[in-house]
Amino acid sequence: MARVDKQDNQNNKENTELVDKLVGINRVAKVVKGGRRFGFAALVVVGDQRGKVGFGTGKAKEVPEAIKKATDDAKKNMVKVPMKEGRTLHHDMKGHYGAGRVVLRSAPSGTGIIAGGPMRAVFETLGVQDVVAKSIGTSNPHNMIKATFDAFKIMSSPRNIANKRGKKVAEIFGNAKN
């Protein structure tokens, strides 16, 4: 029994370290005899500010319940993003989802987060300090976030590339002496 309690404490500790940001709430109405029934849909981004981030959606009759469902969904769908020096992305990349297209660029130290609404929430919860991002096409928050996560899928660090090729990191950059 003690072991299970210890695991629960570790899980709770991990959950308290997570930062969540509410990106948007939509109110939807269903017209029925006698009036309208309102429901709410929430979009939430969750991250540990050290390279892990996820997003989720939730629907319910009440706002707090929708946010809770979205947060739980985001915690289930977290991805690890490799970061350069713990502050920016390793390389520039593009992502798309539906009509949403995003361009993510690494930036020098001191630049800050230059990104629009939903993407800014993703980068803040991810822990990126310097990045330049541009959304092209739709301004729909769902599609912008999904396009950003599509770009994260193709993200790789020099160490991962070197391991795949069976080389050293210095050889990948062309610094190795033959």
Image (spheres, rainbow, N blue to C red):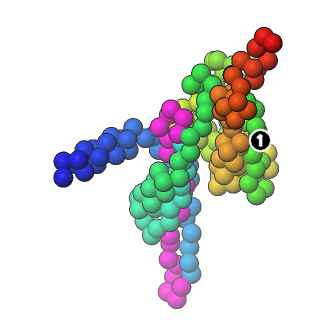
Q: Which residue sits furthest bottom?
A: 33
22 to the left or right of 117 = left
Category of crowding for the residue at label 1, using alpha-carbon neighbours closer than 10 angstroms: few (below 14), some (14–19), many (at least 20):
some
Residue 172 falls inside the magenta stretch: no
Element type at mark 1 = strand
Where is residue 103, by image quadrant? top right
Q: Specify the farthest residue to the left.
A: 1
Would residue 62 appear left or right of 166 to someone viewing this image? left
Q: Position of residue 148 (x, y in %)?
A: 68, 45
Q: Locate residue 165, reporting x and y percent.
A: 73, 32
Magenta residues, dominant SS class: strand
Q: Amino acid at mark 1?
A: Lys
Q: Residue at x 74, y 54 (%)?
A: 97
Q: What residue is rendered at 56% in x and 81% in y?
A: 31
Tell me the magenta residue range: 32-52
Up-down relation of residue 156 to residue 35 (above or below)? above
Q: x%, y% of residue 48?
A: 47, 37
Query: Residue 143 vs residue 40: left or right?
Result: right
Where in the figure is residue 106, as x and y percent of width and height? 71, 27
Taking the spot 81% from the left edge, 12% from the top edge, the residue there is 178
Q: Which residue is mark 1?
A: 94
Q: Quadrant of residue 151?
A: top right
